[in-house]
Amino acid sequence: MNHAVLMRENGDSAIFAVQPALASGAPATKFLIEITRVGETVKAREVKPDRLPSFCPERHINCDGSFCLFWAELERHTIDNHEAAAGWWGKLLIFLLRQGTAAVLRSWPGKADARAHGPEAARFQAVAEFNASNLGKAFISSLREERFSTVEKRVNNERRVRLLLNGKRILSVVRNDRRVMTLRQRCKCGDGNRPISACSDHADVLADFALALDGWREAEQSFFYSFKNTTLKCCGTMDNCPLADFLAVQLDEAA
């Protein structure tokens, strides 16, 4: 059941009144959603930004008002049969329910499962998550909890990416060579006391993880930088919004 009522239809577009059910069974907020066929898939957006912001990266609403429902790098998003259509409706309902929670909490629920901002950052995220899965459950948990970070340093004309856990360096990677420095140190996978050099293929996995994480960071910065000199504004509905921080820096620089 799609929890939707068709209001009107016009060619490749249709407008539905969508009211997903809460876990309790009670009806949630009703949204007026326009669904438009685009090639082999569809796009959805609120007809008018009444319940939702017209644009908010943190709430996965694109600058044209369309909803970001799929991770194109990993998820099938072609709508060509009833099963695919049912899957799409399921994602839309979850998306709308999370919007209600986000409006109250001022943060995105299930943030660890969210995709990075922008396709380039999402690709780096996919690589980072794949490599984390090869380094053990603790590594995956730390990634989901956003406990990892990276910093690039230039030492004697050599670019090094430092991988930090809770703000403390755990290893460094030479960017151009894609190699971990100090292979004699204990592997970070936590599987015994073996040095990185003797722990399966973890020297390569750790290097790829650190570089993917750094690429993810830089790609997201570029994503927000792309809004410089545009008329797009932060909606102000989310705490710790990177777009709000970026725009605040731009204002300070312009002052």
Image (spheres, rainbow, N blue to C red):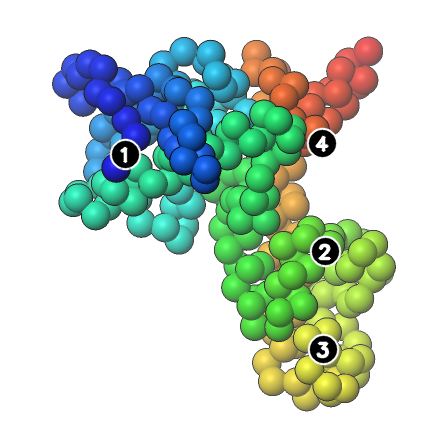
CA separation in Å, label 1 and label 4: 33 Å
CA separation in Å, label 3 and label 2: 16 Å
Residue 79 quadrant: top left
Query: Is there CB contact under 8 Å for labels 1 and 4?
Result: no
Q: Is residue 83 visible?
A: yes
CA separation in Å, label 4 and label 3: 32 Å
Q: Is residue 13 visible?
A: no
Above or below for 204 versus 124: below
Q: Residue at x 56, y 44 (%)?
A: 110
The kind of residue on which mark 3 rests is Gly
Give the residue number, with chain letter if any, for mark 1: 2
Q: Nearer the viewer, mark 4 or mark 2?
A: 4
Above or below for 74 versus 2: below
Q: Nearer the viewer, mark 1 or mark 3?
A: 1
Near-viewer residue (7 or 185): 7
The kind of residue on which mark 1 rests is Asn
The kind of residue on which mark 2 rests is Phe
Q: Quadrant of the C terminus?
A: top right
Q: Quadrant of the N terminus?
A: top left
Q: Residue at x 47, y 12 (%)?
A: 50
Q: Residue at x 51, y 29 (%)?
A: 99
CA separation in Å, label 2 and label 1: 39 Å
Query: Is there CB contact under 8 Å for labels 4 and 2?
Result: no
CA separation in Å, label 4 and label 2: 18 Å
Near-viewer residue (195 or 7): 7
Give the residue number, with chain letter if any, for mark 2: 148
Give the residue number, with chain letter if any, for mark 3: 190
Give the residue number, with chain letter if any, for mark 4: 240
